[in-house]
Amino acid sequence: MSEYDVARRLELFPLTTAVELAPAGERLTIAGCDLHELAERYSTPLYLYDQATLDASLESYRQALAAAYPGEWGITYAGKAFLCVAMAQWIGQRGLWLDCTGSGELAVAAAAGLPREQIVAHGVNKSPADLAAALSLAGTLVVDNLAELDQLVRLARDREGPWPDLWLRLRPGFAVATHSHNQTGQEDSKFGMSPAEATNAVRTCLEQGLPLTGLHLHLGSQFRDPSPVGQALDTLLELVAAEQAESGWLPQVISPGGGWGVAYHEDDLPHPPVDDYVRYVAARLADGCRRRGLPLPRLHLEPGRRLVARAGVALYRVGSIKRTAHRRWLLLDGGLADNPRHALYGTRYSALPVQQPGRPASETAWLAGPYCESGDVIIESLLLPDINAGELIAVPMSGAYHLSMANNYNGACRPAVVWLQGGAAAPNCHLVRRRETVEDLLRRDLSL
């Protein structure tokens, strides 16, 4: 069991987090914004996103790429981690590309005003609607399989207007060390094409005159050892070298995906350095090209979690407090419906009380939600102070894959999102996604 070390837990929170003195005692603030005031104004559960932490995370990637890769490079934000119009606007303002899966995410990108050259369309089983949206809105379309490529060949015969660049997604047969639900590059994965299928796809694109410009792979997410990515790049470059010898074709862009891990609990700190990951991938690609006599492609990385996880904090209010034979239960007003990750992956989180976080800890607690599932637990066995009903609990590292997978289980209404920017001198906290209402839930239903 970890000690109750407030300073260490604060390393999981956004960079602008502080413990400030208030009339009622010490309180957590983020970007100069009082969390109690935000909870009173917008209710709970409430999600907060700190722009300064997003900017710092992005800058760490940019500096690492500029230092490590001798060729051109770019960064694509993986929208599946968290996407709303405000996030897409931040992406556009920072000159990133946005990875969208499906027509819904593509619509968000368009609503935010992103130009098509900054939009990348992904998806393992794109529907006709998805393909139509991708052809209309995206500047790059990542082809997952040969059946999808056949659809594109048929569409190309009758289509007028601009055509997105095509990348092929390779399934190289390697898995990163992570939860099995997060692995995507192994031989039996549902994602991508085998090297033999990818070779056939290259030939088809060349024969049909389709604008094939890149190759893509992604081995999974939340990993700390990048060596399988190096092996996958070797497989990809072998394909490139063989194709250059056969047809002269070379990719302009190579994307090894994203997935570099973060710490969700103080026992997992420090966060794995971005520099280590970027340096390894850049060196492996540059060296692999040199050894095969290939020109350097544009290197595109696709971080999602690593950019946004630490920027996000979930605020909950404690309702009932129960004691069973061996546990103290703090029952919160959110849980499985806004954060299913503990149930899906066993993710281990930490937390702090918003009011007087530095008071002495007393015993461990289990933090769970109000939903009718035993798996509706956010945190197990975390050392915390005595907590009273009505107090606010802040859960850090909540920016990625919570709201993207939020649901309406038991009729839950999905939380509001507040964007934090500015700082202690000039705090600016504003709503970017309103709380879902019961009327929203009923709007889709029809009577018998």
Image: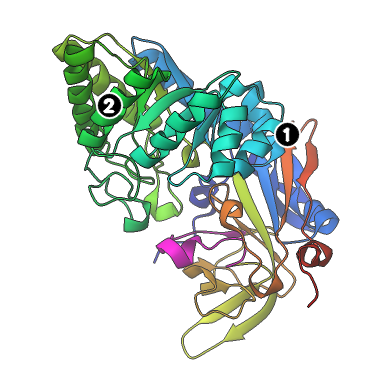
Q: Which residue matches tag 2? A: 280
Q: CA distance from mark 1 to mark 2?
A: 36 Å
Q: Is residue 204 left or right of residue 85?
A: left
Relative image position of residue 134 (x, y in whole percent): 56, 33
Q: Residue at x 40, y 34 (%)?
A: 149
Residue 387 - label: none
Q: Residue furthest left?
A: 291
100 to 91, vertically: above or below:
below
Residue 14 appears in the picture as rendered: yes
- 342 is within the stretch colored magenta: yes
| SS assignment for the magenta stretch, majority | loop
18 to 180, vertically: above or below:
above
Relative image position of residue 94 (x, y in whole percent): 61, 22
322 to 287, vertically: above or below:
below
Segment tinted magenta in the rendering:
336-352
Instruction: Say which amino acid is labelled 1.
Output: Ala
Label 1: element kind: helix
Between 291 and 205, which is closer to the camera in this rendering? 205
Between 161 and 313, which is closer to the camera in this rendering? 161
- 291 is within the stretch colored magenta: no
Q: Is residue 97 left or right of residue 30?
A: left
Q: How many neighbours does mark 1 have within 10 angstroms: few (below 14), some (14-19), or many (20 or more)?
A: some
Quarter of the figure that contains the N terminus: bottom left
Residue 111 - label: 1
Q: Which label sits in the foreground, 1 or 2?
A: 1
